[in-house]
Image: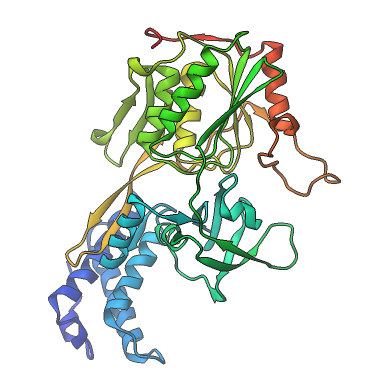
Amino acid sequence: MNRPQVSKTPGLGWLRSSRRLGLILLALGLAAYFLQPAWAAPPASNYDSLRLFTEALFEVSQKFVWPKNEEDLMYGSLRGMMNSLDPDSSFLTAKEYQNFLQGVKAAPAEAGMDLIVKDNLLTAVSVIDGGPAARAGMKPDDHIIKIDGQMVRNLTTQEAARRFQGAPGTAFKLQIIRNGEVKPLDMTVTLEPLGGKTVTTRYLDDAVAYVRIRYFNEETPVELAKVLNDIKQHKPAVKGIILDLRNNARGSMEDAVRSASLFLGNQQILIAKGRSPKTEQSYAGKDRDLVFKTLPPMVLLVDKGTARAAEIVAAALRDQARATLLGDKTLGLCGITKPFPLEDGSVLIMTVAQCYSPKGAKIQGKGLEPEVPGQKPSAAKAPEKVPAPVASPEQDPWVLQAKDLLISGKPKPVAQKGSAS
């Protein structure tokens, strides 16, 4: 086994620090471990990769037109490596990680959009109803190319989320690319508290309950429980429930399990599978959470902005309650991430498990294909491929489709296991 003779390479005095060498070994070790296919060559190939990496670092550190800090080069390498894994994996410096944790605990204001890096572009997966970004004109699938006149480069998903959190009134000038538009669009987004409830409801012709989940957070299960209990007591009894999960890409696995538990009780909601079969875990709800002894027929509205917690809930209700999915294929972003602190306080945030539905269908990277395609708007009426939720559900073509399905009696009610709470 031939190891590279790093110490004999001319000009590599910058590698003498054990910390720097450790970072390089970590970067290449992780790259080889996580990116190589199952049939990869024996470990000797990892040393070839290490040799290539150290050679590249040497060339950049010695010959790039502007001197670069060695730590910046290493951090940039780690950032690029993590960005190559999936939209939810990233590298954060020690300061960035502390800021990220503070933002997770309590962001005083935000833009109200969920972002990922897609095809090397910072892309809005969802734009929360009534939030600052939505009022500014942002739409799902918009690509942000400039922030305050600066080109967006090498941002991770977590960095992007934190960038659009801060003090109320903070304004950002954005330039975006939108599919179907010839020129970039300019708009200003001002950070504000999101406000309002995450769950809203109304009754359509007093026969069908329409429930909209704007986004998931720790309050959503409580708000949803109140809404479902109100529906349960409604007179006359509703013929069905429309659960709108479109344009909803926020929320943790815990938020999803607690919310789905209201419909399913102690039934299985999610299967999480890591690299090793030994890491597989199953998550179920709690019988005491169950609202309906016999769950009314349900139609779930989903689209390409449905991700994370919303995908978990949609998959569980389809498998366990025979809910009908209507709309467009979901995003397929449903991994479980975990932080891995490094010696200097920086952190790798990495997807360690993928989500599967109770019947074993993979969600991560695949998405959920609806049984009923959503009605497409005519080209003369709207240029968008998929209609976004509108202010009035009575005028929303997908809501009307779902309502017709429920009134026709096609989706059947499902008797739940356990007793109603």
Q: Residue 299 is drawn in which quadrant? A: top right
Q: Is residue 10 above or below residue 100?
A: below
Mark yes or no: residue 119 visible: no
Q: Where does residue 119 sit, x and y in percent of width and height?
A: 54, 59
Toward the viewer: 62 or 214? 214
| Badge count | 0
Farthest right residue? Answer: 380
Which of 310/217 is in front?
Answer: 217
Residue 317 visible here:
yes
**Residue 42, placed above or below residue 218:** below
Judging from the image, the colouring scheme is rainbow
Left or right: residue 347 compared with residue 251: left
Relative horizontal placement of residue 159, taking residue 325 as reference (left or right): left
Q: Residue at x 45, y 38 (%)?
A: 216
Q: Residue at x 31, y 27 (%)?
A: 282
Residue 57, image x and y in percent? 31, 80
Point 57% across, 12% down: residue: 234
Q: Is residue 102 above or below residue 286?
A: below
Q: Quadrant of the C terminus?
A: top left
Which image quarter: residue 236? top right
